[in-house]
Image (cartoon, helix red, strand yellow):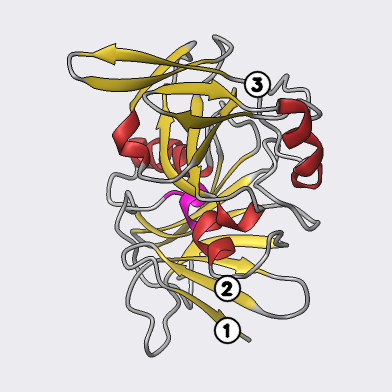
Amino acid sequence: MSSIIPVVFPSFASRTGSGLARCGVWVLGLLLASVSLSAQEVGLSVVTAGTGLLVRAEAPPTTVRLVWEAASGLAPEEWTVVSVDTDATGRAAWIHELGSLGDSGFFRVRAYDTPGFNARVDRVIRAVRVDRPEAILLEAAGMFGSMVMELPEDAPVRVVLRVSGGTVVATQTDPFGDPQIDFRAMPWMGSSDLPWPVTETLEEAVSLMRRAGFGPDYRSVTLRRPVYPGMTEPYFIFGMAGNGFVFVGTVTGKVSLQN
């Protein structure tokens, strides 16, 4: 389970010529205190590779997920996820090409010692397919009961799959553990088959939602494609305050509000 101290903020950096400088962590920490991102602190530096420049992130050796974000300003809604890197065994050093972070003036790195939503769903699907190789993903959801800024690391993940003769509902409560697998001899209605893996992570979907002016927090998240006219791709569907839902397409990246 996670040993992250929630009051520690991510590291921030800005470009200065061909080098990189740590920004005022104290000031930025105060500005972004309301975000409450449960990430560990990361040290950032630039290393040369031939004629190019690489950003090196030094994280605790238990880090299994690193989220790279870029922005033109420091407002919370301006941050865009550039990449989500994972390593199931954990490591301390992570490398990215400086150019791959785009032309934004600022970027930050968030390190986690637990896998993200997509990696957890993948583990559950693999576990189910050991005995039911025909299993097809129908939907996956994070299970939590309050408004959040990001999926809580201890939140259970529920995955629903179509199998021969019915449906499997698999729930993973430990981010590193095997799921509880329940078979139900009945179809699961309302969701179309999903390709797996999808081409977008939950972290990317959250940043797209915020850049479109929604959030920043949400009360639920489900990956599914509803059986409904006009639903043409898998969506991350966020329940917002009130009764609205924000749909983020995993193929097109299109963001829309459905009441």
Q: Earlier in the sequence, mark 1 or mark 2?
A: 2
Crowding near the residue tagged with mark 3, few <14, some 14–19, many ≥20 C-alpha atoms within 10 Å: many
Q: Which mark is residue 59?
A: none
Q: Where, by quadrant of the figure, is residue 36 drawn? A: top right
**Location of residue 107 in the rendering, given as x and y in whole percent from the top left corner:** 51, 37
In the rendered structure, the answer to whether residue 255 lies left or right of residue 219 reads left
Instruction: Please state which amino acid type lies under the numbered disc 3.
Output: Glu
Which residue was labeled with disc 1?
258
**Location of residue 122 in the rendering, given as x and y in whole percent from the top left corner:** 41, 40
* Number of numbered discs: 3
In whole angstroms, how far apart are the C-alphas of marks 1 and 2?
Answer: 6 Å
Which residue was labeled with disc 3?
41
**Location of residue 202 in the rendering, given as x and y in whole percent from the top left corner:** 50, 51
Which residue was labeled with disc 2?
246
Q: Earlier in the sequence, mark 3 or mark 1?
A: 3
Crowding near the residue tagged with mark 1, few <14, some 14–19, many ≥20 C-alpha atoms within 10 Å: few
Q: Earlier in the sequence, mark 2 or mark 3?
A: 3
Q: Is residue 68 above or below residue 48?
A: below
Instruction: Please state which amino acid type lies under the numbered disc 1.
Output: Gln
Magenta stretch: give its range. Answer: 201-205
In whole angstroms, how far apart are the C-alphas of marks 3 and 1?
Answer: 37 Å
**Quick check: can you spot residue 51?**
yes
Crowding near the residue tagged with mark 2, few <14, some 14–19, many ≥20 C-alpha atoms within 10 Å: many
Secondary structure of residue under mark 1: strand
